[in-house]
Amino acid sequence: MATQYYEGVGRRKTSSARVRITPGHGNIIINDKPSEEYFPRVGDIEKVLAPLRAAEMEGRFDITVKVSGGGVTGQAGAVCQGLARALVKMDPDLRSLFREGRLLTRDARMKERKKPGLKRARKAPTYTKR
């Protein structure tokens, strides 16, 4: 028997996350690993759980995530947005709460490209007069 789940897709930088929530006991599995193992830094776990804390629903859902691309911070942001979108599909009344907390808005900031003649996007070589 297939269990009922809600799905949301989140993106941040070059990361993309597909998040599924099912009623459960608060287990979080990210790419077949426990969340503490996948995101060892405390701040990343806090970011991932922000939508659940805002809605006061911690420990009521089992969360399964497939995330790819980018780095650790981008992936944490993508999972956060995907989780918020899945919760809104489950309960549309949460939309205004998440909008207020900017949890549904995609963070459009990307890495700036390197320009010719510069060392990085904006850093110029040291100027020498002679």
Image (cartoon, helix red, strand yellow):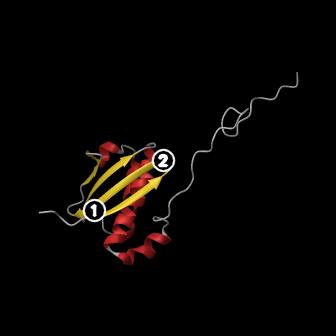
The quadrant holding residue 69 is top left
In this picture, residue 117 sits left or right of residue 43:
right
Q: Where, by quadrant of the figure, is residue 54 drawn?
A: bottom left
Q: Which mark is residue 21?
A: 1
Q: Residue at x 88, y 25 (%)?
A: 129
From the image, which quarter does the C terminus lie in?
A: top right
Marks 2 and 1, Cα distance to the nearest angstrom? 23 Å
Mark 2 = which residue? 14
In the rendered image, residue 105, in percent from the top left (x then y), is placed at 50, 64
Q: Give x and y (percent) for residue 42.
A: 39, 48
Q: Can residue 113 be spotted in the picture?
A: yes
Circle 2: residue type: Thr
Give the number of the mark in front: 2 or 1: 2
Q: Residue sitting at 36 percent across and 45 percent down?
A: 39
Q: Is residue 123 above or below residue 87?
A: above
State the residue at coordinates (17%, 64%): 3
Q: Identify which amino acid the numbered label 1 is placed on.
A: Ile
